[in-house]
Image (spheres, rainbow, N blue to C red):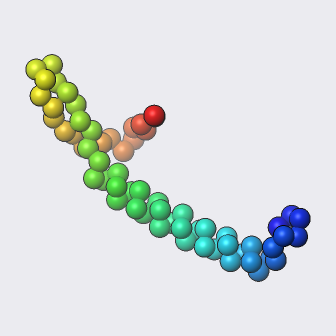
Amino acid sequence: MNRGEISLDDALTLYEEADTLICSSSKRLAQAEKKIEQLIKQRDGTTISIPLDPGVTMNA
């Protein structure tokens, strides 16, 4: 848009579409986070699952 590649109307349309996609993606991510469980391996080798703490971020 800065270089005149698209019109203001087209830019606004793209912005609205992006906003809709962000909202939809955020909702889907929130639903997925509710389903995720953290697996913990105990000393005896068994695995238990506990709900993921939403306040904890997981870094790759």
Residue lying furthest bottom: 9
Indicate the position of residue 30 as horizontal and vertical percent values. Answer: 39, 57
Indicate the position of residue 37 as horizontal and vertical percent values. Answer: 26, 44
Position above or below: 46 against 43: below
Q: Quadrant of the C terminus?
A: top left
Q: Please report the residue visible at 84 percent of the width from the left and 70 percent of the height from the top.
A: 5
Residue 53 lies left or right of residue 27; in this view the side is left
Q: Please report the residue visible at 12 percent of the width from the left and 28 percent of the height from the top.
A: 46
Residue 6 lies left or right of residue 49; in this view the side is right
Position above or below: 7 against 38: below
Q: Quadrant of the N terminus?
A: bottom right
Indicate the position of residue 24 as horizontal and vertical percent values. Answer: 47, 67
Residue lying furthest right: 3
Question: In this orientation, which residue lies closer to the viewer: 17 or 57?
Answer: 17
Q: Please report the residue visible at 22 percent of the width from the left and 31 percent of the height from the top.
A: 40
Residue 1 lies left or right of residue 56; in this view the side is right
State the count of labels.
Answer: 0
Q: Please report the residue visible at 82 percent of the width from the left and 77 percent of the height from the top.
A: 7
In the rendered image, which quarter is residue 18 located in? bottom right
Indicate the position of residue 47 as horizontal and vertical percent values. Answer: 15, 32
In the rendered image, which quarter is residue 56 located in? top left
Question: In this orientation, which residue lies closer to the viewer: 5 or 12?
Answer: 5
Residue lying furthest top: 43
